[in-house]
């Protein structure tokens, strides 16, 4: 009998919900207690220092040494009062996670005394010895220095007894080695481009911010079961496991009552998040068993992204406390839904207007339509880059798996807006417009909010859907850093808006009035971008055919999706907007391809290890037991009789041999292919893993899963899918 699996199960049955000691029930009393917000800074800073800091934050100017010293002193004072002993520059290297290196405030003096020191230089810049982070060749090892630089737009916060200072991470040569720096640059470029376009409608607008509301899906499994599954522990997903009879077909988990143990975890998690100023507000069961979702109130995109990075950390830590393990992988279990991280995206002006929310009158609706149509056109122009921004080894299992958006990028607008765009396309006449034409059009445009009031049509199958006052990018993977998607989305929208402004101005210079120029340009964009609009079922096979007819790309795996990063025009766009240099693009491309290979390599090795060390021995043991039984029957009964009596056993013995051989053949072929792949360059290796090795892993799994179905339960060494999915 396999001890690990049964030990894990019996441990699990002992578990009770961990009691929470969460003070009070008013979140407002402790929300943000561990964050050094600007309003708190005010208490510690002189008016002069505070004003200077705000000025720098708003203009993006460099913060002088004296102001930095003041801020550092304030941070130290505030955090020491809260029991903090260490500080860290918190950054987001290209591994996709966050990194931190803690230093103590405490400094010994030569005369035996000691003091707590933290000044402006320590706040503004650090040089972590972080030469092991991926740099895609941007840092030679002899010049391995990387610098972290304070991002004053995201407030410092406390985790445990450490003050965490959000920073960007750059190389000695100034190249971005992280996700935050290009994100800030992309946000800046969309700000400039959108502000310029807003001038057509409202001269008061001088800043446009991106708002991001992410929704985080995840699975929870019991720690003991997790520990008894080497595949999940090493790769984040189950590489083996026959589908349980009951999956999600009854849809009884979605929005169902939250199990007690899970609820205790969620409350604890929310408390920790609220202390960190993360405005999580929503929690519910998701579609798959043991799958859940949480969502915060949306925030400015840079802060929202920092918060998502932090949340993934808080989720993992809190889960451990409750004897759970959190799975952020996009597809931990075959046969049930995977997990995503919907990125809800909109643009918001300093005057308090959401540019993607239909307005109250024709003028504000013209503005809405301008941003709406340009966004759709941007998706059409750069669908391939958008696809690349969400490519990852985990997401390859999810996209197009009949439960998640397909790998084909398209935009869903809803019936009302689709009809409105169709009307605009038809009704804007070529040539000079009469005042009546314009009035008619404007009246039509003015009707928009009324029409949208009852807009309840939603399309869950679309990767990029308009949901009334924002777009929802649903193809983002659950483990992703939102920055990847946000860098691309905001850059391509900025690029589109800049072009729009140019084109409208050309029309105005040729004699069109402003409204006419805007309307005609919108009409042109509506026409061009039509192929990207899709209101139907994104899961259907018909869509795959239809999309191909429309000339839309369908990159099924990461290696092919990433290739767009080699396109010269893409480089030009990112360079022109000052978001990424071609060196940075190249480096990021290499890092991502390499990450793909390394992750698949680990999966392949773990597949082989588990097959050889766990599954084959269990199957062979059981087969031996059957053989003993057959021999025993032969001893007791006559030859003819025993042959008949042992029919089932002999069949099983044969079947086990067939599956064992199939399993071993797949493993052998996998080994051969891996040896061949190892000699190739990294791009070709990625292709080999996707096209050759991955299918062999699947074949190995099929054979192993068949063995699971015919081997006695007692000798099966790994916790089964039903145990992973249905025990909590
Ligand atoms: P769903 O039906 O997809 O669950 P919700 O209405 O619950 O949609 O909203 C999902 C997310 O959208 C929330 O995180 C919310 O804060 C966010 N959201 C709402 N308005 C905006 C906006 N203007 N910009 C960005 N995100 C937004
Ligand atoms: Mg959603």
Image (cartoon, rainbow, N blue to C red):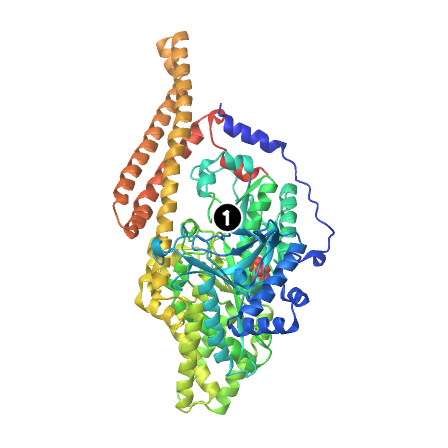
Q: Is residue 636 above or below residue 264?
A: above
User: Ligand 2: does it lie within 8 Å of the C-beta at label 1?
Assistant: no
Q: Which residue does the image show at 25% across and 45% down from the upper left? A: 679
Q: In this picture, is 371 found above or below 476? A: below
User: Residue 81, percent across and down?
Assistant: 68, 55
Res 348 visible: no
Give the tally of numbered discs: 1
Residue at left 58%, top 71%? 53
Please tell me how crowded label 1 is: few (under 14), some (14-19), or many (20+) other residues with Cα within 10 Å: many
Residue 462 image point, x, y percent: 47, 60
Pick out the residue farthest to the front.
Answer: 111
Quadrant placement of the C terminus = top right
Residue 585 sits in quarter = bottom left
Horizontal and vertical percent position of residue 223: 55, 37
Residue 631, visible in the rendered structure: yes
Asked whether 113 or 522 is in front, the reply is 113
Farthest right residue in view = 24
Q: Quadrant of residue 457?
A: bottom right
Front residue (pair 595, 429):
595
In the image shown, does 444 or 61 lie closer to the viewer?
61
Q: Give the residue number, with chain letter if any, for mark 1.
A: 328
Label 1, secondary structure: give it: loop
Q: Is residue 725 above or below residue 64?
A: above
Give whichever of 155, 673 is nearer the camera: 155
- The percent coordinates of residue 294 (x first, y second) are 58, 53
């Amino acid at each position: 009998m396999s001890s690990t699996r049964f030990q894990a199960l019996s441990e699990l049955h002992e578990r009770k919900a961990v009691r929470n000691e969460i003070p009070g029930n008013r979140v407002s009393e402790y929300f943000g207690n561990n964050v050094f917000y600007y309003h708190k800074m005010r208490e510690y800073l002189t008016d002069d220092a505070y004003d200077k800091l705000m000025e720098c934050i708003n203009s993006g100017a460099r913060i002088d040494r004296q102001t930095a010293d003041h801020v550092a002193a304030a941070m130290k004072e505030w955090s020491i009062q809260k029991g903090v002993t260490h500080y860290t520059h918190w950054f987001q290297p290209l591994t996709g996670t966050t990194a931190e290196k803690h230093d103590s405030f405490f400094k010994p003096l030569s005369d035996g005394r000691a003091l707590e020191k933290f000044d402006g230089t320590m706040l503004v810049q650090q040089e972590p010895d972080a030469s092991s982070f991926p740099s895609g060749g941007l840092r030679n090892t002899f010049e391995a220095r990387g610098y972290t630089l304070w991002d004053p737009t995201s407030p410092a916060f406390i985790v445990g007894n450490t003050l965490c200072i959000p920073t960007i991470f750059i190389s000695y040569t100034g190249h971005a080695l992280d996700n935050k720096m290009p994100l800030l640059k992309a946000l800046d470029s969309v700000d400039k481009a959108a502000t310029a376009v807003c001038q057509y409608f409202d001269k008061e607008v001088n800043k446009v911010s991106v708002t991001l509301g992410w929704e985080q899906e995840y699975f929870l499994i019991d720690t003991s079961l997790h520990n008894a599954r080497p595949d999940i522990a090493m790769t984040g997903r189950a590489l083996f496991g026959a589908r349980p009879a009951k999956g999600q077909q009854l849809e009884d988990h979605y929005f169902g009552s939250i199990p007690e143990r899970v609820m205790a975890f969620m409350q604890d998690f929310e408390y920790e998040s609220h202390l960190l100023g993360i405005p999580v507000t929503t929690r519910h069961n998701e579609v798959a068993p043991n799958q859940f979702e949480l969502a915060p109130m949306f925030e400015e995109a840079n802060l929202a992204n920092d918060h998502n990075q932090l949340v993934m950390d808080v989720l993992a830590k809190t889960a451990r406390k409750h004897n759970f393990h959190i799975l952020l992988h996009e597809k931990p279990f075959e046969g049930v839904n995977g997990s995503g991280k919907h990125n809800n995206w909109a643009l918001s002006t300093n005057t308090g207007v959401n540019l993607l929310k239909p307005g109250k009158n024709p003028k504000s609706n013209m503005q809405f339509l301008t941003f709406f149509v340009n966004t759709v056109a941007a998706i059409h122009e750069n669908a391939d880059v958008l696809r690349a921004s969400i490519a990852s080894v985990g997401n390859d299992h999810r996209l197009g798996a009949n439960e998640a958006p397909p790998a084909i990028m398209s935009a869903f607008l809803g019936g009302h807006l689709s009809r409105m765009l169709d009307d605009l396309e038809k009704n804007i006449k070529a040539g000079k417009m009469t005042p009546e034409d314009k009035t008619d059009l404007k009246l039509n445009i003015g009707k928009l909010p009324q029409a949208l009031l009852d807009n309840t049509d939603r399309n869950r199958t679309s990767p990029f859907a308009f949901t009334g006052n924002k777009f929802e990018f649903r193809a983002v993977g659950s483990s992703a850093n939102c920055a990847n998607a946000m860098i691309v989305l905001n850059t391509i929208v900025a690029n589109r808006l800049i072009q729009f402004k140019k084109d409208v101005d050309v029309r105005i210079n040729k004699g069109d009035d402003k409204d006419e120029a805007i309307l005609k340009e919108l009409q042109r964009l509506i026409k061009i971008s039509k192929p990207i609009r899709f209101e139907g079922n994104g899961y259907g096979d018909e869509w795959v055919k239809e999309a191909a007819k429309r000339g839309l790309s369908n990159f099924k795996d990461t290696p092919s999706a990433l290739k767009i990063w080699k396109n010269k025009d893409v480089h030009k766009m990112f360079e022109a907007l000052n978001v990424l240099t071609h060196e940075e693009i190249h480096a990021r491309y290499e890092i991502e391809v390499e990450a793909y290979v390394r992750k698949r390599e680990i999966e392949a090795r773990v597949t082989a290890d588990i097959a050889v060390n766990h599954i084959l021995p269990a199957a062979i043991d059981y087969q031996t037991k059957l053989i003993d039984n057959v021999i025993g029957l032969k001893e007791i009964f006559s030859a003819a009789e025993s042959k008949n009596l042992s029919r089932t056993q002999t069949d099983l013995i044969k079947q086990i041999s067939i599956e064992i051989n199939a399993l071993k053949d797949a493993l052998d072929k996998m080994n051969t292919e891996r040896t061949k792949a190892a000699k190739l360059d990294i791009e070709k290796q990625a292709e080999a893993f996707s096209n050759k090795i991955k299918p062999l892993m699947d074949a190995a799994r099929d054979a192993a899963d068949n063995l699971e179905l015919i081997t006695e339960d007692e000798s099966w060494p790994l916790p089964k899918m039903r145990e992973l999915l249905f025990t909590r």
